[in-house]
Structures are given as structure tokens and as C-alpha cells.
Amino acid sequence: MRSMNRADSISNRRFGTTDLAIVMGLWSAMAVLLGGVLSELASDSETPMAKSQSEAFALQLEQGLDAAPVTDPSMGGRAPASEMGDLALRTGDLGRDPWGQAYKYKIVSDGIVVWSQGRNAECDSTEALRKLDQGISVSEFKFAGDDVGFVKPRHKVQ
């Protein structure tokens, strides 16, 4: 059996090109994973922002509805109930969400729904919105997929 002295064992330990490539590969993989996690965390701040902006738009739309001129039906004008009827199912776009797409809104007889189509820029809540057209209450409305928004219930005008 050959005995090794301390000098021989140190000289046999070399950090070669292969070892360097392995270490660099591991560091690169860690950087990619960490970058993905940080990116996801950063984009997560966009969702609460979209929700609060949609709430602000819903409140503005509600104020606009409340400020609609009320005319006396006995004078040939329209009553508030008929005005609300004309506003039922009104839809449109307003503002830009954190992903650069327009916010969507829908006004129905018992509320206002304002939403962002989210990061994928596709309306994942189409089926739920269709149910609003069929008369379900806004209190039963739920956003689907990555859509995010605000539902503002309103009392029906009698």
C-alpha cells in the first residue's frame, strides 16, 4: 500500500474546467428559478391594483347613474324606473388595466360589474356574464380564470 503525504493529496485536488462548468450551470439554473419567482411576485401586485381600479370605475359609473336627470312622467318625461330599464345590460370599455387592456363594464338592473380580463387578455368570465343577461343577480356573479374586477350591487328602482 502506497502512503500519501500531505503534498501529494493537495496536488491531486484540482479545480478543472469541467468543475467550473458544473458550478456555472448550477448558478445559472438557480438564477433562472429565482428570476421566475421574483417575476411572479412582481406581477402579483398587478392583480390587487386591477381590483381597486375596477372598484373606482364601478363607483364612478354608479354616481353617473344616480346623477341621471329625473323628469316628471306626468309632463311627458321618463320615470326613473324606465331610465334604469334602458340602462340594463349596457356594456362598454373604460380606462386601461395594469396589463394595458381596457377595463370592461356591464350595467344590469341590479348592479354594475367592472372587470379586467387579466394577464391573458381573454374574457374568462363569458359564461358568468351571459348568466347576468339571463337575469341572475349580481350577488351570485363570480369572475372566472384570471379575470379580476368589482361587482357593485344596486337596489332595483321600483
Image (cartoon, helix red, strand yellow):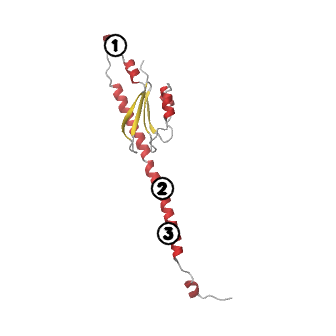
CA–CA distance in space, label 3 to label 1: 79 Å
Q: Which x, y percent locates residue 73?
A: 34, 13
Residues tagged 2 and 3 counted as in contact (Cβ below 8 A): no
Looking at the rendered structure, the kind of residue marked 2 is Gly
Q: Quadrant of residue 109?
A: top left
- Residue occupying image coordinates x 48% and y 56%: 36
Which residue corresponds to mark 1? Answer: 73
Residue shown at 51% from the left, 63% from the top: 29
The crowding category of the residue bearing disc 3, from other C-alpha atoms within 10 Å (few below 14, some 14 to 19, many at least 20), is few
Q: Is residue 106 left or right of residue 2?
A: left
- Choose the circle earlier in sequence order: 2 or 3: 3
Corner quadrant of residue 56: top left
Mark toward the viewer: 1 or 2: 2
The three-letter code of the residue at mark 1 reads Pro
Q: Residue at x 37, y 29 (%)?
A: 62
Query: Which mark is on residue 24?
Result: 3
Name the residue tied to disc 2: 36
Amino acid type, residue under disc 3 in the picture: Met
Decide: is 14 above or below 52: below
Instruction: Say whether disc 3 or disc 1 marks the residue closer to the N-terminus.
Output: 3
> Residue 61: horizontal and vertical position, in percent?
36, 30
Outermost residue, right direction?
1
